[in-house]
Amino acid sequence: MIRQLQQLSAADIEALADVLVDCVEGGASVSFMLPLTHERARAFWLGLADSVAQCRRLLFVASDSGGIVGTVQVVLDQPENQPHRADIAKMQVHRRGRRAGIGAALMRAAEDGARAAGKTLLVLDTVTGGDAERLYQRLGWTRVGVIPDYALWPHGGSCATTIYYRRIA
């Protein structure tokens, strides 16, 4: 089940922290290095709570019988010369929920949410060659190019990122 969170409860923050820690421990390059403590992961989500509550950022979650298993964000708050655009950020699926269509469902919800917010263009970046890149290509996103040595893997060593966009009007 996919739903949009408009407020982050303590239970939501705990569950989202679990997803973030699992993804980083699984090797996802999503801005954090190992070891990632639950305290740091909770602080990340707490730091986004106001942005979500003020509708500057849409936050979608996927749940299974074990609770929140995935998440994606739509960053609506853009510079004044880019009111038509939003960024997709931190698309994460816990390892227990991968290869079950959760990522695709989250992305469809993110696109629908952005469209409902009046956005017509979405942009994202992802690790080059990763599972998410294949997902975005299957969903019809347009590849712009690759930036080498863009970020670090959680365990160290650099990775490239691929930039994508999608028109949703």
Image (cartoon, rainbow, N blue to C red):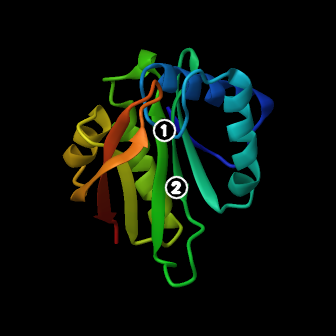
Which amino acid type is marked by label 2? Answer: Val
Q: Position of residue 54 (x, y in %)?
A: 73, 61
Q: Which is in the foreground here, disc 2 or disc 1?
A: 1
User: Dot 2: what SS?
Assistant: strand
- Taking depth in this image into account, of 56 and 149 the one nearest to the observer is 149
Q: Which residue is mark 1?
A: 30
Disc 2, disc 1: CB below 8 Å?
no
**How many marks can you see?**
2
**Residue at the right extreme of this rendering:** 10
Residue 67 drawn above or below residue 5: above
Q: Is residue 11 left or right of residue 16?
A: right
17 sits to left or right of 99 = right
Is 82 above or below relative to 15?
Answer: below
41 to 77, vertically: above or below: above
| Sequence-first tag of 2 and 1 | 1
Q: Position of residue 110 (x, y in %)?
A: 46, 51
Q: CA distance from mark 2 to mark 1?
A: 15 Å
Residue 108 in view here: yes
Dividing the image into 4 quarters, which one contains the C terminus?
bottom left
Question: Which residue is rendered at x = 63% and y = 30% of the image?
Answer: 16
Return the x and y of residue 77 as percentages of the image width and height: 60, 68
Question: Quick check: can you spot residue 7?
Answer: no
Which amino acid type corresponds to the residue marked 1 in the rendered image?
Answer: Val
Residue 5 screen position, x and y as percent = 65, 44
Q: Which mark is residue 74?
A: 2
Q: Callout 1: 10 Å neighbours few (<14), some, many (20+)?
A: some
Q: In the figure, is residue 152 to the left or right of 66?
A: left
Q: Is residue 26 above or below residue 52?
A: above
Q: 10 Å neighbourhood of mark 2: few (<14), some, or many (≥20)?
A: many
SS at circle 1 = loop
